[in-house]
Image (cartoon, grey):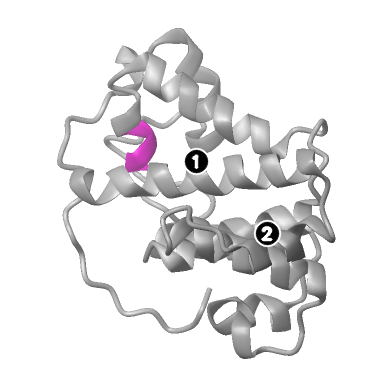
Amino acid sequence: MARLRQVRRDDLHPGAEPIFQLLFGDRDPVDEPGTPTGTPGDWWTTFALVPDVFDHAVAGFALYRSSRRLLDPKLRELGQTRVGWCVGSRFVYSQHCKSCRTVGIPDEKIAAIESWETADCFDDAERAVLAFTDALSIQHGRVPDGVFDALRDHLSDEEILELAYIVGTLRNARGAQPSLTPRVRRRTTGPC
């Protein structure tokens, strides 16, 4: 359960209603939590407290899935899944493992994201994306020249900017989450 007040369905700003309908159907998620992907949905009900923040977050999600993106969706999902692992977010990690499957990433690669440095299933472009993601999320944006050069061998400047923005946005959104949600210890049975 969220530490902050959750917004009830009747109190949503107009821009949030279509998102709530998509995620929760006709239910009020405060009274009947749960999304189709198995999460409680309290992120949505909490972020709805401030309409501008909610709308900005939703616009960010729409941006990274836009057909206007140049970045290959498989590389995007590798980066997003890895940042979830790096920042210790089971939620982000598990949700993006599912997204990896929807864009066609094989289970072998998904399972290897945790320890990609020692896995031999990734090609050079994927390894460059994973190394760049680590630098952004673990090294707080300090990207060694060798990592950047390897990334530039495979991605255009525009694709690199898209990747940096998407990974950085997800990392920052995750950064606020621990303060808003009490720590709950859960055992997981598998990587995803």
Residue in the foreground of this view, choosing between 24 and 152:
152
Residue picked out by circle 1: 169
Q: Is residue 135 magenta?
A: no
Name which residue lies at 58% across and 35% down: 61
Q: Disc 1 on helix, strand or loop? A: helix
Q: Is residue 27 above or below residue 168?
A: above
Hey, what amino acid is under mark 1? Thr
Hey, what amino acid is under mark 2? Phe
Foreground disc of the pair 2, 1: 2
Name which residue lies at 59% across and 40% down: 165
> Residue 103: image x %, image y %?
78, 58
13 displayed left or right of 59: left
Residue in the foreground of this view, choosing between 34 and 67:
67
Q: Disc 2 on helix, strand or loop? A: helix
- The magenta stretch spans which residues? 41-45
Residue picked out by circle 2: 148
> Which label's residue is closer to the chain start, 2 or 1?
2
Name which residue lies at 61% across and 68% down: 131
